[in-house]
Image (cartoon, rainbow, N blue to C red):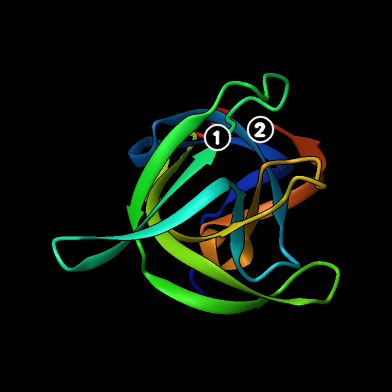
Amino acid sequence: MSTIHKVIIGRLEKITLPQLHIHNLPVKVDTGAKTSSLHVDNICEYSRDATPHVSFDLHPDTHQVKQSQHCHAPIKAIRKIKSSNGEIEVRYVIQTQIQLGAYSWEIEVTLADRSDMNYLMLLGREAMGKRFLVDPSKIFIGCRTQ
């Protein structure tokens, strides 16, 4: 029998999205959610070099809502997603790099209106893959697991 080493993370973690120039973003880790979602405003679809892109604004600091970061990304997909309240929403999906502690990998993120949620980003189980175990009694421990 082989031993698989998995990093333990908490129910809340801080991540970096380097391609979007977002650092130390608090996220809710949710093993019940299949996909990850990011709260954004002012979504606008456009074409660059015949490739569909999306531009959007996000507020990296929930306490400074007037501060925003304008971002651009290629559209990976447009999907129907069942939201936490059970409604079906059509969302843009982007692919971006994520960093959690010493770990870095690509994830898919849906762009959504999470303004009524406590955290701007939800890290779902597809993004975590087989890398982590979640200890719901802990918070912000991912940066210490190196």
Residue 44, picture quadrant: bottom left
> Label 2 crowding class (10 Å Cα cut-off): few <14, some 14-19, many 20+?
some
Query: Is residue 80 depicted above or below 145 in this figure?
Result: below
Q: Position of residue 102 (x, y in %)?
A: 43, 35
In the displayed structure, does residue 12 sit left or right of residue 96? right
Residue visible at 64% across and 71% down in the picture: 34
Q: Amino acid at mark 2?
A: Ile
| 120 relative position to 7: left or right | right
How far apart marks 1 and 2 lie (CA) works out to: 7 Å
Number of numbered discs: 2
- Vertical relation: 56 (above or below) 21: below
Residue at 43% of width from left, 35% of height from top? 70
Q: Secondary structure at mark 2?
A: loop
Q: Which residue is mark 1?
A: 145
Circle 1/circle 2 CB separation < 8 Å? yes
Question: Which image quadrant is residue 77 in?
Answer: bottom left
Q: Could you say whether the residue bearing mark 1 is in a helix, strand or loop?
A: loop
Q: Quadrant of residue 53?
A: bottom left
Q: Is residue 63 visible?
A: yes
Tell me if 96 is positioned left or right of 29 in this view. left
Horizontal and vertical percent position of residue 112: 63, 57
Q: Residues within 10 Å of mark 1 (few under 14, many from 20)?
A: few
The residue wearing badge 2 is 141
Task: Give the amino acid type for the residue marked by disc 1 in the picture.
Answer: Thr
- Residue at image point 76% right, 67% down: 32
> Residue 111's spot in the image, x, y percent?
55, 57
Which mark, by number, is residue 79?
Answer: none
For the point 57% across and 28% down, the residue is 144
**Residue 130 visible in the displayed image:** no
- Nearest the camera: 118 or 72? 72
